[in-house]
Image (cartoon, helix red, strand yellow):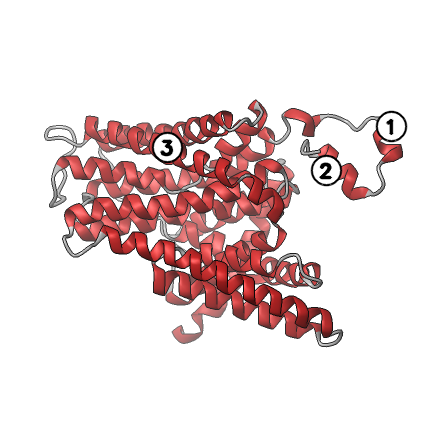
Amino acid sequence: MDSYRFLLSLAIILLSTKIFGLATQRIRMPQVVGALLAGLILGPAALGILTETDFIQSLAEIGVIVLMFCAGLETDIDELKKSGKKAFVIALIGVIVPLIGGFAVASVFNRPGVIDSDASCSLFLQNVFIGVILTATSVSITVETLKELGKLKTRSGNAILGAAIIDDILGIIALTIITSMADSSVRMGTILLKICAFFVVAGVGGYLFHIAYKKWSEAAERGLHRHAIVAFAACLILSYIAEAWFGVADITGAFVAGLIVSKTQRTQFLASRFEVLSYLLLSPVFFASIGLKVVLPEMTSAIIAFSVFLVIIAILTKIIGCGLGAKICGYQNYQCVRIGVGMISRGEVALIVASKGTQLGLLGSDFLGPVVIVVVITTIITPILLKPVFRFGPSGSTIPEGIKTFASNYEEVGKYNSGEK
């Protein structure tokens, strides 16, 4: 009977995420918040009805891959190119500020008499590593929320996507530097070479695939389902190559795959098919799985205080860091706030980094609880904050009658109303 338990677990996840999603929608919050709460409440942190299994973990991984692939399909490549340099500045400052903030908070609490760490490396490296954890960004939560709000293709949305991809690379570099100090077998030069090689391979191979796929899709008028299968296979292959061969996150490979397939004759068809797949099965499992990962250990007063300060710093440093980077790049104030809020979520990325640090002796067991709390709060608060911040600026204004009269189609009106026209 236990071998079929996954069927019941899957049914509970699908029903609960939808029920909680509708409940949060009733109080004017994005449905993704309800899906996250469903996993948290039904998981080990609360009721303990569900636990994360290998099946759920694998399905959730496919879910986030499809989510980022769809984001790539729907991304305006021309706008992404324009925001490339700006995205790098946003990501760079958005990594440096949380790194400093996390290090400062850890330095206050991670010392004898306050919180005694059982990590094997020096206090300095431990504190730096906590800062590295705060540099992580889980853009999948933001992507789903922006899609739900219809704001993914805005200028702010493109900046968030571009900065998140670069943030992922900078996070890998920061993690590599700190782990190389604790583990002599890790070579910094090798990691950087692999990262560069991935983008070269993805760029050259992606260009050739795009040309071939575009010609094939234009020539083949029947059998549209074959296009979805080929595109999905390309997404999975590039995700595997990114993670297994180059050490780059699989979601980065999936996003690049979406960009490669975009701007073809079948883009809208592919987007509609993957949206159904994601909505029906994969997205609910992914968002619920984040909550299922959460297991809160016993907390002392010192650890609770550290958790509170770490959460505050985690939120503020991303808003300030990414917002400052956006301001330097010439974005309007309301766009800076949007970009900063969009980068708050740490999600499963921070948990993966923390797990790696625990294995290498860079993170004491007493500090894992506060990291989990940061993940939970930043993951839930991001979609909650995104909705109101996208009301500020031109997006909250009404469209003058003249614009309504002369706008040639609904898309033009939508662009004006989004504040990106």
Of badges 1 and 3, nearer the viewer stands 1
Dots 1 and 3: beta carbons under 8 Å? no
Dots 2 and 1: beta carbons under 8 Å? no
Percent across and percent down for residue 350 are: 35, 45
Q: Which residue is mark 1?
A: 402
Percent across and percent down for residue 6 are: 45, 68
Q: Amino acid at mark 1?
A: Gly
Whether residue 309 sits left or right of residue 58 in the image: it is: left
State the count of labels.
3
Q: Nearer the viewer, residue 217 or 11?
A: 217
Q: Which residue is mark 3?
A: 314
Quarter of the image containing the C terminus?
Answer: top right
Whether residue 233 sits left or right of residue 273 in the image: it is: left
Q: Earlier in the sequence, mark 2 or mark 1?
A: 1
Q: Earlier in the sequence, mark 1 or mark 3?
A: 3
Q: Amino acid at mark 3?
A: Ala
* Residue at 77% in and 43% down: 411
Q: Give the image quarter of residue 221.
A: bottom right
Above/below status of 299 relative to 391: below
Q: Give the image quarter of residue 131.
A: top left
Of badges 3 and 2, nearer the viewer stands 2
Which label number is shown at residue 415?
Answer: 2
Above/below status of 55 relative to 169: below
Query: 10 Å neighbourhood of mark 1: few (<14), some, or many (≥20)?
Result: few
Q: CA distance from mark 2 to mark 1?
A: 15 Å
Whether residue 101 sits left or right of residue 409 in the image: it is: left
Which secondary structure lies at badge 1?
A: helix
Q: CA distance from mark 3 to mark 2?
A: 33 Å
Which label number is shown at residue 100?
Answer: none
Above/below status of 203 relative to 223: above
Q: Earlier in the sequence, mark 3 or mark 2?
A: 3
Query: 10 Å neighbourhood of mark 3: few (<14), some, or many (≥20)?
Result: many
